[in-house]
Image (spheres, rainbow, N blue to C red):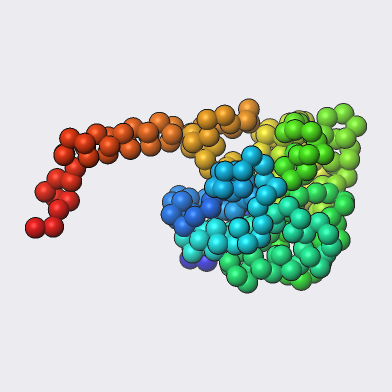
Amino acid sequence: GRRVTVRDVSAAKARGEKWPMVTAYDAMTAKVFDEAGIPVLLVGDSAAMVVYGYDSTLPVSVDDLIPLTAAVVRGSTRAMVVADLPFASYQASPEQALASAARFMKEAGAHAVKLEGGRRILPQVETLVSAGVPVMAHLGLTPQSVNVFGGYRVQGRGQSGDELMADAKALEHAGAFAVVLECVPADLAERITASLSIPTVGIGAGPSCDAQVLVWQDLMGLNPRPAKFVKRYSDLAGEMTHAVQSFAAEVANGAFPAPEHTYQ
Ligand code: KIV
Ligand code: NA
């Protein structure tokens, strides 16, 4: 089978079909999600927090994310793999954006990139699209701007909703193939989704978006303090605690390894 492409994603919107996106940062989880039928895998700069242990997404670099992206591409066969361009790898100029995107595509095999921002980064989006790089945009709570927002809070309430709508339309016009809406009121996300012909991918943006995305550690229950918009579909922290404690107990009492785990 072939990979999911941007054409499949836009065809899904035309058919009114909703789809899931999840993050992945390594080959084995990518393989699980890919074989489960997740059409789009995002190597998010959320890796800064869930892989590297920082308390924001700002510290990670292209060099930090390339090996993770390459692993996700190697671990999957069907999903489209979208790579996040990290903080300060695209804001300076369209040339910088293309150089960073090219590294993700040539060195890691990414199929598309995602970047944060609206009308301020239109020149970047236009340059990427005309170079043949599919661009997923990201509006609302854009975590690389947390220091401007003064925390992780809902965006687009009141007047700023019109700005967000204008950003979304401008991004579509510039050639973005999808736009993530993070932490925006559901009615605004609904209006943006209805106004665009490209899909909206919601995270804390209500039920009307064309797609939904979650960080996999959040949806699996590995994050002890997830945001309000997270639903936990598993208690992986509990499962893993139980499993590693069982291993520890069996090492201590000699039950592991048993004869079937042993070469005679
Ligand atoms: O980095 C990330 O995981 C993201 C998604 C939450 C949209 O940008
Ligand atoms: Na991100």
Q: List the single residue furthest toward the front.
A: 252
Instruction: Please state, as top left, top right, bottom left or bottom right, where the C terminus lies in the image.
Output: bottom left
* Left or right position of 263 against 51: left
Q: Nearer the viewer, residue 16 or 118?
A: 118
Q: Is residue 178 visible?
A: yes
Residue 65, horizontal then vertical, whole percent: 61, 58
Question: Which quadrant holds residue 49?
Answer: top right
Quadrant assignment, res 173: bottom right
> Residue drawn at (85%, 35%), measured in percent from left and top?
161
User: Camera-side residue: 225 or 63?
Assistant: 63
Q: Residue at x 43, y 54 (%)?
A: 28
Report the side of 52 relative to 239 (left or right): right
Q: Is residue 127 above or below residue 91?
A: below
> Up-down: is 165 above or below 2?
above
Residue at point 52% right, 30% down?
A: 224
Can you name the residue that lies furthest to the left here? 264
Horizontal relation, residue 93 to residue 99: left or right: right
Q: Is residue 169 visible?
A: no
Disc tally is: 0
Q: Nearer the viewer, residue 59 or 204?
A: 59
Residue at x 72%, y 42% (from the top left corner): 143
Front position in the image: 178 or 184: 184
Give the x, y percent position of residue 133: 72, 66
The image quarter containing residue 35 is bottom left
Query: What percent of the width, then of the height, locates residue 14?
Result: 69, 51
